[in-house]
Amino acid sequence: MRKRALVVGLGIAGMAAAIGLRQAGWQPVIVERAPERRRGGYFVGLMPDGRQAAADLGIAGHLHTRNPPDGGKAWSLTRRGRLQPGLGFLHQPGAPAAVVRGDIEDALWRGTRGDGTGGAVPVRFATRPVEISDTGADLRVLLEDAGTGERYPERFDLLVGADGMRSSVRRTVFGPHEDYMTSWNAIICAFQLQEQVPSFEEADSLISARAGRGAWVFGFADRPPTALLTYRTQDVAAEFAGSRIERLRAAFSDMDDPVVRHALSSLEQAPEFLFDSVHQVRMPRWSKGKVVLVGDAAWCLNLYSGMGATFALQGGAGLGRALRESPGDLGAALAAWESRLRPSVTRHQHLARIKKQLFVPSNRPAEALRSVVVRLACAARERRLARARAAAPA
């Protein structure tokens, strides 16, 4: 009889884990507290390891990427309103794939519908676990249907918590959020623009970064850009009182440039947007008995790292691989999976501190240093491109 796994969360990490489990011969079931799938989303740069994980999961052929040629043009706005060549996310080494979150989720959703080696993964919407009991010999989960209010118990051989940074599975099994979530004293707001900032090309990326605030526009080849507004604060809780848009207007009140103006104006027309505080999740272990956490629930690196989707895919693909290698020993499989992935996760959690200074400098000296670093990086990139053009056949 095939072993059964409950996956909590229908995001990137959850669907990747479900496909990995199915590849390992397990029978996964996904529960999602929302009543339906999410669509769209903000900019995501998928790194080479993430693209390899997508291939390992069998979804690479479903993944639509949106890269402008050579990563597109990027522009930085100075304090005096001047335009300078900038360094966009897509210009970093590794040639990230430009997608929106929904592109990855669409590819994963198609993967969960069947791949020729197994049927569709069952998905129960508006459903969440309310009690988790792992005795070692038996794993029982009490599930609740939000539509009817019905509660019913089920047995599983493994529970995968893929329910995000504020994971209910983590809180239930491992302890309160305060034990694992570190605050970065910053706010992010990500949303879809209906059109590019006036006077710029559709695929251009734009950056306006000042001490304590940053506005970014991420360009694509075949759709309008997405925007990111981020700022530092010493009172995170206060930022959630009252209107989110008014909070953003107050934070950017003295940044009167075309990027900020257009972003704030567009935000008021946006049908939805992500407004949240910035954290990392740090845990000594990602599993306990027959419960394992993946993605942001286990190791949230935060948006500054640019590695969340890549590690979510790697986590699911790697989990399936470890279970295939140790089919009769769940503890050994989970230990092997974590030992392979943790060093890279830890390294990128540290790197996110540096990247935060690129997104939102901490003060005026950091802002000046950031400008110097970006100019040097732009010059190095131009030299690489020139060498590549010179080496290309006529």
Image (cartoon, grey):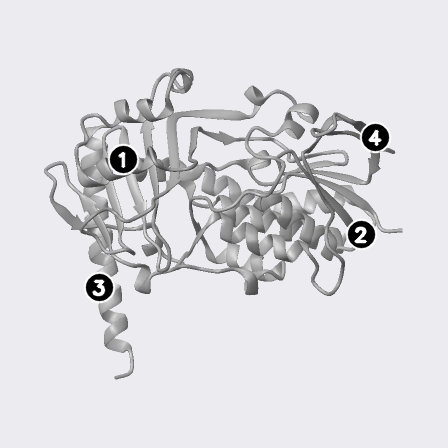
Residue highlighted by disc 2:
327
Amino acid type assigned to the residue bearing label 1 in the image: Ser
- The residue at 61%/35% (across/down) is 34
Q: Earlier in the sequence, mark 4 or mark 2?
A: 4
Q: CA distance from mark 1 to mark 2?
A: 54 Å
Q: Nearer the viewer, mark 1 or mark 4?
A: 1
Mark 3 touches mark 4? (CB < 8 Å): no
Amino acid type assigned to the residue bearing label 3 in the image: Arg
Amino acid type assigned to the residue bearing label 2 in the image: Pro
**Residue lying farthest right?**
1
Residue highlighted by disc 3:
383
Mark 1 touches mark 3? (CB < 8 Å): no
Q: CA distance from mark 1 to mark 4?
A: 48 Å
Q: CA distance from mark 3 to mark 4?
A: 62 Å
On screen, residue 223 above or below 188: below
Instruction: Give the structural element (helix, strand or loop) at label 1.
Output: helix
Q: Earlier in the sequence, mark 1 or mark 2?
A: 1
- The residue at 76%/59% (across/down) is 118
Residue highlighted by disc 1:
265
Q: Earlier in the sequence, mark 1 or mark 4?
A: 4
Instruction: Give the structural element (helix, strand or loop) at label 4.
Output: strand
